[in-house]
Amino acid sequence: MTVLVAYESKHGATGEIALTIGDVLTAQGVEVDVRRMADVDTVMPYDAFVLGSAIYMGSWMRSARHFLDEHAEILTLRPTWLFSSGPIGDPPRPAAADSFDVSDLVETVHARDHHLFGGKLDKHELGIAERAVAGALRVPTGDFREWDAVAAWATAIARVLHADVPA
C-alpha cells in the first residue's frame, strides 16, 4: 500500500506537518510519498491519501480545494484523510477554529476524518500586506503546532491502513 501525503502551504508550516505525518506513517511500515499538491501529476498510483492545507481567511487554499475537486472521483474510492493547519494562539483563537468548516471538503472526497492542527506564524516570513493585516488584527506570533497530536493522528491512520490490508 502506498499513501500520498499531499499539502499546500504558503510559508512552509503545513508542509512540515505533512512531512511529520509521512515520517510517522513510514515508521509504522507504510510506504509514503510526501509532495506539494502542485507537484502531483496523477493520484492513480496511490492506495490512500492524507491531504492537507493551510487555512487562510477561514478556508483551505484555493489550489488545495482545486486539487480535491480535480481528483474527487479517485479520492472517494480510496481511503482519504484531511488535515488543516492554521489556528494560532495559546489557546488557539476560538473564532478561527469555530468559523472554519470543512464539511463540504469532507463530503466531496468522502474523507474518513478531518483534523485541525494549530499553525505557525513568523511575521518575518510575511509579505508587507500580510504583516499589515497580522498587525491590525493583533495576531500572535509563534509556533502553535502540537507535534504529539500530529504523531498520534498519523499513528491512528497507520492502524486503519494496516487493518484495511487483506492478510
Image (spheres, rainbow, N blue to C red):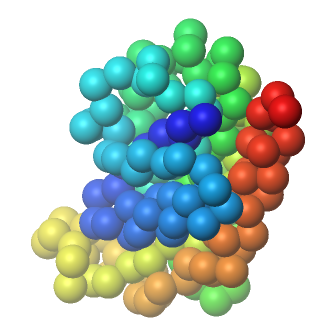
Rendered-image quadrant of the C terminus: top right
Count of all numbered marks drawn on residues in the image: 0
Q: Kindly indicate the quadrant of the structure image that contains residue 62.
A: top left
Q: Residue at x 35, y 21 (%)?
A: 42
Dividing the picture into quarters, in which one does residue 1 lie? top right
Image side of residue 145 versus residue 140, left or right: right
The location of residue 116, given as percent across then percent down, is 66, 59
Image vertical order of residue 49 relative to residue 109, above or below: below
Q: Residue at x 59, y 72 (%)?
A: 118
Residue 154: percent from the left, percent from the top? Answer: 68, 60
Residue 71 showing in the rendered view: yes
Residue 11 higher or lower than 112, as above or below: below
Give the image location of residue 140, x and y in percent: 46, 87
Is 110 on the left or on the right of 32, as rendered?
right
Residue positioned most to the top: 73
Q: Residue at x 28, y 66 (%)?
A: 11
Vertical side of 56 occupied by 130: above or below: below
Report x, y in % for residue 60: 48, 44
Q: Is residue 44 above or below residue 164?
A: above
Name the residue furthest front: 167
Q: Could you say which is closer to the camera, residue 83 or residue 86?
A: 83
Does residue 147 appear left or right of residue 23 in this picture? right
Residue furthest toward the left?
A: 128
Residue in the image at 67% along x and 61% along y? 28
In front of the other: 166 or 136: 166
Foreground residue, 136 or 37? 37
Would residue 85 be visible to someone looking at this image? no
Left or right: residue 70 compared with residue 126:
right
